[in-house]
Image (spheres, rainbow, N blue to C red):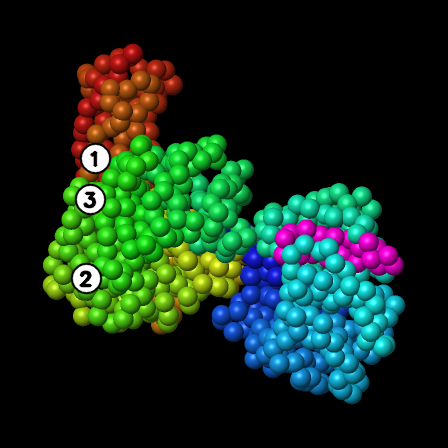
Amino acid sequence: RLGKGEIRDMVYSPDGALLAVASSIGVWLYDTNTYQEIALLRGHADTVYSVAFSPDGKTIATGGGGIFEDFTIRLWDTETGTIKSTLRGHTYSVSSLSFSPDGKTIASGSWDTTIRLWDVPTGTRKKTLTGHTHQVDTVLFSPDGNTIATGSNDGTIRLWDVLTGALEKTFTRHTGGASSLSFSPDGKTIASGGYDPPVHLRDVDTGKLKRTLTGQAGWFARVAFSPDGNTLATGSSYGDIRLWDVSTSKIKKTLTGHKSSVFSVAFSPDGNTITTGSNDGTIRFWDVSTGNMKKTLTEHTSSVFSVAFSSDSKTLASASIRWDDLTIRLWDASTGNMKQQTFTGHTDGAGFGSFSPDGKTLATGSWDNTIRLWDVSTGNMKKILTGHTQQVNNVSFSPDGKTIASGSYDGTVRLWDVQAGNTKTRIKLREEDSAYSVAFSPDGKTLAGGGWGDIYVWDVDTGTLKTHLKQTEGPGEACVAFNPDGRTLAIGGWGNMGDIYLWDIHTGILKTLIGHRIHVNIVSFSPDGNTLASAGWDGTVRLWDIPTGLLEKTHPLWWDLPTGRIKNTFTGHTDWIHSVAFSPDGNTLASGSGDGTVLLWDIAPPEPPRLAADVNADGTVNIQDLVLIAANLGETGENAADVNSDGVVDILDLTLVAGAFGETAAAPSAYAAAVENLTATEVAQWLQAAQQANLIDPAFQRGVEVLKNLLSLLVPKETKLLANYPNPFNPETWIPYQLSKPTDVTLTIHAIDGKVVRYLDLGHQAAGFYHDSTRAAYWDGRNTVGERVASGVYFYTLKAGDFAATRKMLILK
């Protein structure tokens, strides 16, 4: 996971040791001493809008919302990170939470205009407070727990009696909505900030306005009293934080550093630190006494609109479309760490980006109507391409890196000379159409474009239209991608906007993939063309099986295609997905979302699961596993050779392994290795023991049959004497042979004159193969008295029952 999502809310634990940060993907917990992330609480299906600690610090409450409609409140155990209970009832996003001082009640405010009071131990709803006419942005218990203050987009602040639920007071000074409230520690004063610049201080008992703080730049003020009540902190849409002397209403300090709206301010319990969260994606810790910044956490990001891999798969670029985060960032794809280069310069949201084929240049299109070329190694801007009169939606390098194609809402597609920075070709679409997406064919000779209308295919050299697909089912912002075969075009977000179309640009054949519930924003083929990735407003990434020749009517899947051939569905984002990209090696898929994160998915084929019978874990169940079982017969306790996990390695395990021959991801070597590792005697013993077990289990019975086959393989059809090895030799050699039946075996070595040099009595031996060096007859080149014999020709004679054979060998010294 790259990035930690958009920041929504944050709060200190009562002891100040933890900071909880609500984000678009969950709640992050940070150690405030080390500033290190220690946990991510995930359970909401969508963005977490609000967070609160219980007074004892043992419980964290979180409020959900977003397009996936998780409007629940969840209570978490701080120590274990597990969900204790889930509170349901709100019908829209839960915008604010507050614990009562005794920790027994939670107040929740929602965009459904209601405030609800919940009993913490039971999770049941105690009261619902109604009266606000627009969304409730903030709720807050008074220090004595008797009053709840609420601020709403209807421009009012209301005070409610906790015991009765009755409305006590209504304040109406905020013209644009009251978005933030803070009680002074003594409970006598309430500060309010809203969508208009002034910050108001009111007397809680009388409701009278005590002070109005003017001088705060911007609007959307966030307010917080210090623990001693002497200082009020305010944050604004301009990114600055001001510390006010409450008694004099004068500004004590102005803290600058944020580049966008400050939506959260919180004092540490000891009052020495103030923490601020901003739409610029950062959390900053400030020293209250000096006003100096102590630490900045920069891993949070805004909505990610575009992702692109470099040609070596090592670097991933992400771009944001938010006005408050106009950056392009580079990430190390293997570690997930952000690289030092952050590209800034666009004056409006950055759209789709594309790496040049050599990976040295990054091109980004923007809503500021420009295309910018960046030096990847330095982060410096190389060129600005101007000409489009409306936002640039998509940019793409040609395969040779010499041309960039761009599509714009101005209804044109442009081809740019990368070296010169000039427009080579300008293609005008129909008057009512726009260009949302462009894609080069693999050979660079064809360009496809989709927009709010038809789908077009042009000749790159001439700019002439080769073919187009007329819109028949209603317009949509169509995205396009070429298959590496160069003839199949995938189209998303067009017609029925949850469907995906595969179009053969040569034959005109059009087929449909059905699976997404709503608009598809992006489609992308894997490098081998066998997989199509798609994503969109439903927050899922889907992988489709696209085998070669799928659009040919003779293909066996032709009629199945309209129902969808989904290989996998990835879930994890909590907002719309704007972009997906395969790494060039095809092993990773990146997806960028409005939740502020980029997720990396491992799509490499998984290793086959290890079979229990694969004792040596080499991916194949074969003779080697059988030998390992035999070597461990009688062993007890935990052992890989205990296939049936009954605590002992016995004949049952051995027979089950035999029965599993061939159940493997790799082709088994059948019984080829048997003659090198087993003897007929031991296999005969195993077979006898297995038959005596007399089990009717099919796997066991199959194992018995395999042992019979092995035994027949281990008994040669005829007795043979084979050539010794090595030959010539000095000073030793091995003499292989095989026996078709059990018998006494002797070996006699003669000199060329017929004299006996050495006599070897090999004893009574079972039928079988005596080929390898551990079983063949061995001669060390010495005579019967232990002397080394001279160089020359010698003969060896094997006698086995009625069988006798002689061969010659040579000693060279």
Q: Quadrant of residue 636?
A: bottom right
The residue sitting at 75% across, 84% down in the picture is 167
Q: Is residue 26 left or right of residue 31?
A: left
| Label annotation for residue 696 | none
Q: Look at the picture and state if 429 lies above or below 387.
A: below
Q: Which residues are magenta?
A: 232-250
Q: Secondary structure at mark 3?
A: loop
| Label 1 to label 2: alpha-carbon separation | 77 Å
Query: Of discs 1 and 2, which sits in the foreground?
Result: 2
Q: Is residue 143 left or right of residue 656?
A: right
| Residue at (72% x, 62% y) in the render | 198
Q: Secondary structure at mark 2?
A: strand
Residue lying at 21% horizontally and 35% vertically, measured from the top left? 721
- The mark closer to the camera, 3 or 1, is 3
- Mark 2 surroundings: few (<14), some (14-19) or many (≥20) residues within 10 A: some
Percent coordinates x, y for residue 634 in the rendering: 50, 55
* Residue 539 visible in image: yes
**Residue 107 locus on image (x, y percent):** 71, 76
Q: Position of residue 792 (x, y in %)?
A: 23, 14
The residue lying toward the viewer, choosing from 502 and 531, is 502
- Mark linked to residue 469: 2
Per the model, the C-alpha gap separating discs 2 and 3 is 18 Å
Callout 2 amino acid? Leu
Q: Which residue is mark 1?
A: 721
Foreground residue among 58 and 534: 534
Q: Gap in Å between the C-alphas at discs 3 and 1?
A: 75 Å
Image quadrant in which the C terminus is located: top left
CB atoms of marks 3 and 1 within 8 Å: no
Q: Amino acid at mark 1?
A: Leu
